[in-house]
Image: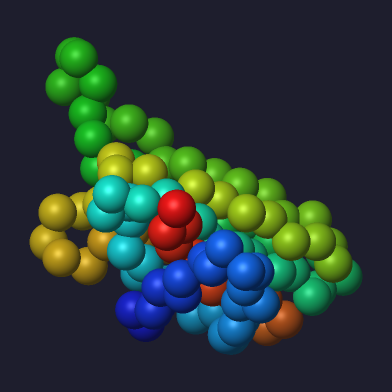
Amino acid sequence: MAAMVVQKLLEAGTNPVLSAANLTDTAPVNDGHSNILIVKNGSGSSVTVTLADFLSDDAGDANPSHVVTVAAAATAYIPLHQSYDKGDGTGAQITYSAVTTVTSAVLKGSF
């Protein structure tokens, strides 16, 4: 498991640095700004990204995890909601179905 570092989205534009994804990563969630997970799939087949949701519904049942399918050779931009925060200081827990050609980054909106 690797903790992802947040990159600041600048008004002048940002070229985020994408790093190799791990089977499990953690990322800071919304801390007053909008954090976004970028996932770039360089593979010839789709990759599934799963974000655990730690909130419960009104009946006390756990919310389902948020699952995003990133198509082959595509890029997905996924908002990191507060409900993905485990509450132990690690932030969102992100798992990938494959990581061989997957890169990712977290951006924070600052405006």
Q: Residue furthest front?
A: 12
Looking at the rendered structure, the number of numbered marks drawn on it comes to 0
Image coordinates of residue 54 in percent, x first then y, are 25, 43
> What color scheme is it?
rainbow
Q: Residue visible at 79% across and 56% down?
A: 71
Q: Quadrant of residue 75?
A: bottom right
Q: Is residue 53 left or right of residue 7?
A: left
Residue 50 vertical placement versus 98 (above, below): above
Q: Quadrant of residue 90?
A: bottom left
* Direction from residue 9 to residue 87 in the image, left or right: left
Question: How far across and how far down the image is residue 24, in percent?
Answer: 42, 72
Please name the residue shown 32% across and 31% down the image. 63
Return the x and y of residue 43 as percentages of the image width and height.
Answer: 81, 73
> Residue at (12%, 61%) from the top-left corner?
88
Indicate the quadrant containing the N terminus: top left, top right, bottom left or bottom right: bottom left
In depth, the one of 62 and 18 nearer the eye is: 18
Report whether 32 appears left or right of 36: left
Viewer can see residue 97: no
State the residue lying farthest toward the left: 88
Query: Is 10 displayed left or right of 33 in the figure?
Result: right
Give the x, y percent position of residue 31. Answer: 27, 54
The answer to which quarter of the image holds residue 39 is: bottom right
For this orientation, the residue located farthest to the top is: 59
Residue 66 showing in the rendered view: yes
The relative height of residue 49 versus residue 104 in the rendered view (above or below) is above
- Name the residue located 15 percent from the left edge and 65 percent from the top edge: 89
Front-most of 41 and 30? 30
